Image (tube, helix red, strand yellow):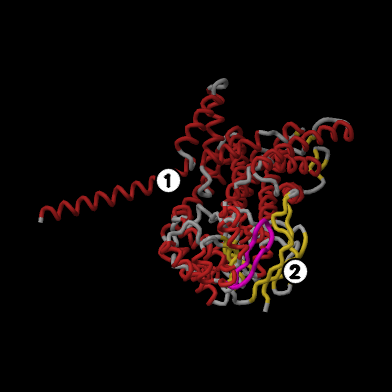
Amino acid sequence: MQILEGQGVNKYFGGLAAVSNVDFHVDQGEIVGMIGPNGAGKTTLFNLISAAFPISSGEIRFKGHKLNGLKPHQICKMGIGRTFQETKVFANMPALQNVLVGAFFGSPNPVSGANAAKNATQALEFVELSAMSATPAKDLTMVNQKRVEVARALATKPELLLLDELMAGLNPAEVGEAMELVKRIRDKGITILMVEHVMKAIMGICERIMVLHHGEKIAEGTCQEISCNKQVIEIYLGGETHAGN
Amino acid sequence: MDISKFTSKKFLATAGVLLTILVFLATFPIYSSNSAVAIGLTILMYIILTVSWVMFSGPTGYMSLATAAFFGIGAYTCAFLYQKSGPLLPLPAVIIAGGLVAFIFALVVGLVTLRLKGMYFAIFTFGFIMLLNQFMVYYELNILGARGQRVFPITNQTAFYIALVILVLTLLAAYLIRRSRLGLAMQSIGENEEAAAHMGVNTTMVKVLTFAISAFFMGVAGATMAPRWEYIDPTVAFNMLYSFMPILMAVFGGMGQLYGPVVGAVVFAYSERALRLRFPYHYMLAFGIALILIIIFLPGGLTGVVPTLKDKLSGLIARLRKGGQSERHANT
């Protein structure tokens, strides 16, 4: 079953088409990866799904409901959580309070204080940060700030989680841990759409990959198909003509 | 509900201090001279304005200069309803009306302008005061035919007691908002508005609502002062000083704790008065220097020092104890 689908999605910044005519879908329970060179429009597409920007044309549907025209907080309450490429933690709040914001406001129904606190504690435990619950987010390492973001998004009880470069800047051991975390999130029954540059991670956990280039979707398929796709290799490694010369 | 919370030592101590202050303030007009009550009233007014400014601008980080605008709206509402020639409504109703009109203005203005960020919001709110000021000048001269409004007078004592009640309510509201999820939402907006929105916080609603609540208390303060002054005109009601002073007082006292702005307003308003009487030409110089020093050396304001001192003190005690222990170990 398709949990998220986009049809003919366009986004223009002035005359520049940041995302142009992209069709995509995410099935329930999947881990879908989105790759592409810098400036390909991956984060823009995330921002369109989570309503940070209004969509120029086309439509995006979540569980059959049209998302066009909704505000970010409404998208969140519908069940789409997200993290950010450059971490946007609430710097002066303790880690637990960061997560508490998601627990209080992310749910479609009003949550009691006790339940919100319970959800927040559980979410922080899930990302293995319980020991640092009282530490202000700004004093955490980048890896841990990213974990706080994941916990904060999980506390909103999402059905679909958008992870924007969760693994950027992590060392190989940390990438391994992050991959485990992503798998555990999926095992909770949460569908995942992730933007990533770390190929090892993408190839290791994604069931399906879509490739964006200059705002257009140029390829889609399993890891095997993508890694053999001539066009993708050209984009990432440079065209044969360059190599030939 | 957990009863032990209300019988703990800390709670009892705080309640005792608050009660003592309240009794002192409530009996203050009885044994004090009229001029002392007048000074007390000014200080109360500044505390109300400062606490209500911090209510919104403190956690969200939106620098509002509209305090004078809402104060003036309250004052003018009172002037029209509580005229010298014959009050249209009893005083308590007039004062509440002053707050409500300010609340409604803030809702409308907030919906239009709270999408502005940073400096643009500050400039807009600044322009808002000038707009209201000029509008009232025009309205009085061209439509009413005379500048200024005469207001049915009340005594310093009456005004003092009304201001005291308002102050208690303002502090109560500020305390409750701070502890509620509305407070958490505002704080998250101040930390990172974009992330807050994506975590389900209805940022527009939270900002507009709290902006309007804080405006209510500013309007109520204006409506209390107008009958005390007996006469208001646009330059008195929309005096820019009412926008800038609360900000200075809040910075001076520190915004980290609820009592910070209160301490700031009391110390600032009182010392301003005392210094002005003694050094009428140089008191602003002393103030300027004091403010600069505080911003450089005490970024958390006067009360921001308390937690730091506490930390240092307990650290010192721990070190002394540890030192004593290791000495004993060395001896054995």
* Location of residue B189 in the rendering, given as x and y in whole percent from the top left corner: 61, 53
Q: Is residue B292 above or below residue A233?
A: above
Q: Position of residue B207 (x, y in %)?
A: 67, 53
Q: Determine which of the numbered discs, if any, sits on residue B306 in the image.
A: 1
The overriding secondary structure of the stretch rendered in magenta is: strand
The quadrant where residue B239 appears = top right
Residue A176 appears left or right of A194 = left
The residue where tag 2 is placed is A66
In magenta, the rendered stretch is A208-222
Q: Amino acid at mark 1?
A: Val
* Residue B216 magenta-highlighted: no
Find numbered disc 1 in the image and state the secondary structure of the residue it sits on: helix
| Residue placed most toward the observer, A108 or A206 | A206
Is residue B6 in view? yes
Horizontal relation, residue B265 to residue B316: left or right: right
- The residue type indicated by label 2 comes to Lys
Report the front residue among A40 and A74: A40
Question: Badge 2 local density, few (<14 within 10 Å), some, or many (20+)?
Answer: some
Question: Which labelled disc corresponds to residue B40?
Answer: none
Name the residue located 66 percent from the left edge and 49 percent from the top edge. B214
Q: Residue at x 46, y 59 (%)?
A: A170
Q: Residue at x 54, y 40 (%)?
A: B251
Confirm whether residue B91 shows in the render. Answer: no
Residue B174: where, in percent of width, then height?
A: 59, 52
| Foreground residue among B103 and A85 | A85
Left or right: residue A41 compared with residue B94 = left
Total residue callouts: 2
The span from disc 2 to disc 1 (Cα, nearest Å) is: 52 Å
Asked if marks 2 and 1 fall on the same chain, the answer is: no
* Chain bearing mark 1: B
- Disc 2: which chain? A
